Image: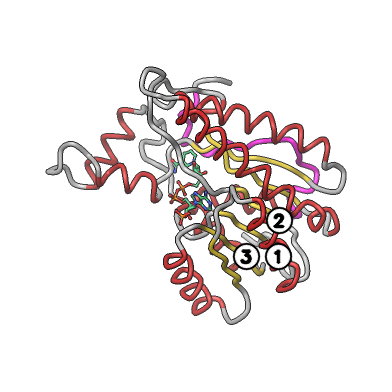
Amino acid sequence: MHYGYDGRVAVVTGGSSGIGLATTRLLLASGANVAICARNEERLQKVASDLTAEFGEGRVFAKALNVLDEADVQAFAVDVQDRFGRCDLLVNNAGQGRVSTFAETTDDDWRAEYELKVFSQVRPVRAFKAMLAEANGSIVVVNSLLAYQPEAHMVCTSSARAGVQNLAKSLSVELAPKVRVNSILIGLVDSGQWQRRFEAREDKSQCREDWYADLASKKRIPLGRLGQPEEAAAAIAFLGSPAASYITGAQIEVSGGVSRHI
Ligand code: NDP
């Protein structure tokens, strides 16, 4: 599929792994130049040099930062302007989930989770919105199905994700008509997060394939498996592209059908 990103510039937060990396790769393959960020400098620079080898010199710009750091995110936007001169798409993807029940979740946990979920949106949007407006660009929020279908064992992530969905809707109104804002709702997608949970499994004799098959069965995923990062990336690339030019304030679920609501 051709998404029409020739001559465009995208920024992907958390572009060094999982969904962010698959999105970066798809956008590069579709003609965009891409700026990525993540905290772990070594992994980020390795990814950037692999992508440069694959897609060519000057197509990727990588900067190590925490998306929660206002000054660093502002400086990143200045770097993107200097390097590429524009920004057509911001993919707010950086983050991770927190597994804890209400009984286990401390006040500090609640604060940290809300800080991550809310400010990983607020800070990049604030830094890039002028450039996005100039380019008639768009924002894609990588959110979770937990926003609509909370899980008791991920109580603060679910609650914060609902807030993020609400924020995306407000942004789609405030930033219109220049900037479109949409989101994807992930169910379970095989990424760094699930790899870490697999490595921490109780029964170490269980192989990766069986552990994932078990998980898909326990979660009653109608398509019978976890999603691949490339499947999330395809929805992100579509929402950010000219093909979605009349879509804003909307969401696409990438969950293998695991949602129970209609
Ligand atoms: P990965 O762990 O594979 O990738 C997460 C990426 O985000 C990494 O590049 C990581 O790099 C970066 N990152 C994390 N925190 C920060 C931060 N504070 N500042 C900058 N970069 C950061 O996970 P996924 O691909 O699964 O996750 C992508 C998004 O999708 C996340 O927001 C996640 O919560 C969401 N999601 C994923 C689901 C799934 O099943 N996979 C389900 C629901 C939502 P580094 O650690 O170096 O900073």
From the viewer's perspective, is 139 left or right of 93?
A: right
Segment colored magenta: 241-259
Task: Indicate the position of residue 73 as horizontal and vertical percent values.
Answer: 65, 56
Q: Quadrant of residue 27?
A: bottom right
- Return the x and y of residue 37 as percentages of the image width and height: 56, 60
Report which quarter residue 151 is drawn in: top left
Q: Seen in the image, is 138 located left or right of residue 134?
A: left
Q: Are marks 1 and 2 in contact (CB under 8 Å)?
A: yes
Find disc 2 in the rendering and name its residue. 89
Where, quadrant-wise, is the C terminus in this rendering? Answer: top right
* First reached walking from the N terminus: tag 1 or tag 3: 1
Q: Earlier in the sequence, mark 1 or mark 2?
A: 1
Per the image, the residue denoted by label 3 is 35
- N-term-proximal mark, 2 vs 3: 3
Identify the residue position indicated by label 1 in the image.
Answer: 9
For image coordinates 49% across by 30% down, the residue present is 157
Q: CA distance from mark 2 to mark 3?
A: 10 Å
Is mark 1 in CB contact (under 8 Å) with mark 3?
yes
Q: Is residue 142 left or right of residue 190?
A: right
- Neighbor class of circle 2 (other Cα within 10 Å; few <14, some 14-19, many 20+) is many
Quadrant of the rendering where the N terminus is positioned? bottom right
Residue name at image x 60 percent, y 70 percent? 61
**Image point 63% across, 66% down: which residue?**
34
- Secondary element type, mark 1: strand
The front one of 210 and 70 is 70
Measured as percent of width and height from the top left, residue 121 is found at 64, 43
Q: Residues within 10 Å of mark 3 (few under 14, many from 20)?
A: many
Residue type at mark 3: give it.
Ala
Look at discs 1 and 3 and give the one toward the viewer.
3
Q: Secondary structure at mark 2?
A: strand
User: What amino acid is found at the position of numbered circle 1 in the picture?
Assistant: Val
